[in-house]
DNA sequence: GGACAGCTCCCCCGCGCGGGGGAACCCGCT
DNA sequence: AGCGGGTTCCCCCGCGCGGGGGAGCTGTCC
């Protein structure tokens, strides 16, 4: 299995290379000290897995990961981070990273991580993901904003279509109604939610999780 | 390793039991057909892993998982779901589940999943977690939609304020600009994104993850 | 030096939107 | 029977919004 290392500190690279080199099924095929070299490195060496430091001068690991993904690379990205609950974890996940390794991980954990992401699985910190889910549910829970719960069935329908970007006339066509009726429902939605215009209603709908 | 099965469909339980029974290191120690029986079942049989269906009449898998966690159970929970991107995934994660199995998973995947969560690791769908991260990231850089990436810095600022529900006059006040200037930037945003009005621009901003 | 992009501001014009009214019908509840 | 909420439609009116122009100013790039 081919592995590439990207870290600005040569000492870290050497340590990782030593750990990986002892395994018969793993091979370090390339190294880089800067995110800007990553695309070129991966193109030349075609690694199965890239070990990528997040914090680097210049192009950081997250930007480099994003560039790799956008380029359609088949390489799996394993990000090296210091803290499991770092904000970098969320950013890197969104960028397309496949897993994380703590800098203080043991050699066994490093090897296990490489093989895990190479298999196509993801290596994530349960606590970090759970925290992520908890925050998301809290901000967009089923309970939602009490004002939205007071909407009638029809008003809810109208709000959903507003949140699709439809004009009153388009909503009327979609629901087979007169435009005046839609205007009436929209007015009710605005009054009940206490917002000024349809744009604010749409914002509320998205932020509350009423629509996605 | 002791495993408990919770699913309202006896056929599914039988299938899982058959798969698990063939392994020398695994043993099915109990079954339940309803979330309300879970606490009692786990208390009696002390399983290492609970395979839990999400969709069940009465007390569903998410509520049952929450109850287990709240009771301080040491059992690891592996949730059975139909779709990887189901909203249930987020809810179950927040409730304290340790991993997910797709209903259409192969026997090998089921066994691997059980052993994975039993080791204390989490078994998650990369796509689902990535979607979660994408929704969570607020001020991430270049957005996923190409049209949005082509916005200038100022246009991006204006779009973010539009997505807060601000009127042109309010945006002008916030950015210390003339209203005419804001109108100009808004026109650029609409032209570049190819949408008709500010409401559609806001919809695009939320759906693309440009704002949260 | 010219070309170009981005930011800033200005004009006019048409129209969809939102506020404030009202009214009819159906339904469930009392 | 009376009442209230929900759904459907109608009127007028003011205004913010979006489209169509244009213009001056800063930078950068070649």
Image: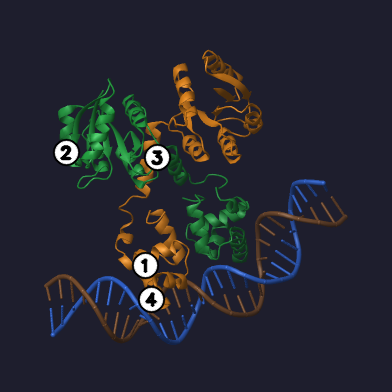
Chain colours: A orange, B green, C brown, D blue
Mark 1 vs mark 2: give the one in front. 2
**What residue lies at 19% left-to-right and 41% top-to-bottom?**
B34
Residue C16 locus on image (x, y percent)? 50, 73
Q: How far apart are marks 4 and 1 (CA)?
A: 13 Å
Q: Of the residues under marks 1 and 3, which one precedes in the sequence?
A: 3
Q: Distance between the residues labelled 1 and 3?
A: 31 Å
Q: Name the residue under label 1.
A: A189
Work out whether A188 lies above or below B18.
Answer: below
Residue D18 locus on image (x, y percent)? 57, 68
Q: Can residue A104 be seen in this view?
A: no
Q: Residue A132 got which mark?
A: 3
Q: Are marks 1 and 3 on the same chain?
A: yes
Mark 3 vs mark 4: give the one in front. 4
**Would residue B73 appear left or right of D27 to someone viewing this image?**
left
Chain that bears disc 1:
A
Question: How packed is label 3: few (under 14 Cα within 10 Å), some, or many (20 or more)?
Answer: many
Q: Mark 4 points at which residue?
A: A181
Mark 3 vs mark 2: give the one in front. 2
Residue A173 locus on image (x, y percent)? 44, 72
Residue A38 locus on image (x, y percent)? 63, 31
Q: Can residue B3 be seen in this view?
A: yes
């Amino acid at each position: 299995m081919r592995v590439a290392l990207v870290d600005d500190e040569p000492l870290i690279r050497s340590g990782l290379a030593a750990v990986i080199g002892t395994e018969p099924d793993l091979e370090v095929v390339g190294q880089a000290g800067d995110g800007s070299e990553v695309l070129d490195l991966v193109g030349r060496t075609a690694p199965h897995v890239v070990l990528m430091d997040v914090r680097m001068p210049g192009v950081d690991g997250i930007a480099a990961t994003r560039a790799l993904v956008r380029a359609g690379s088949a390489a799996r990205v394993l990000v090296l981070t210091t803290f499991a609950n770092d904000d970098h974890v969320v950013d890197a996940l969104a960028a397309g990273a496949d897993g994380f390794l703590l800098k203080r991980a043991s050699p066994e954990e490093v090897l296990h991580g490489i093989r895990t992401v190479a298999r196509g699985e993801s290596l994530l910190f349960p606590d970090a993901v759970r925290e992520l889910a908890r925050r998301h549910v809290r901000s967009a829970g089923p309970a939602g904003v009490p004002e939205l719960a007071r909407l009638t069935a029809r008003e809810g329908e109208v709000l959903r279509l507003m949140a699709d970007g439809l004009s009153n006339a388009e909503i009327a066509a979609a629901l087979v109604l007169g435009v005046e009726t839609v205007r009436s429902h929209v007015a009710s939605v605005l009054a009940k939610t206490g917002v000024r215009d349809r744009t604010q209603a749409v914002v509320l709908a998205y932020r509350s999780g009423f629509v996605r």
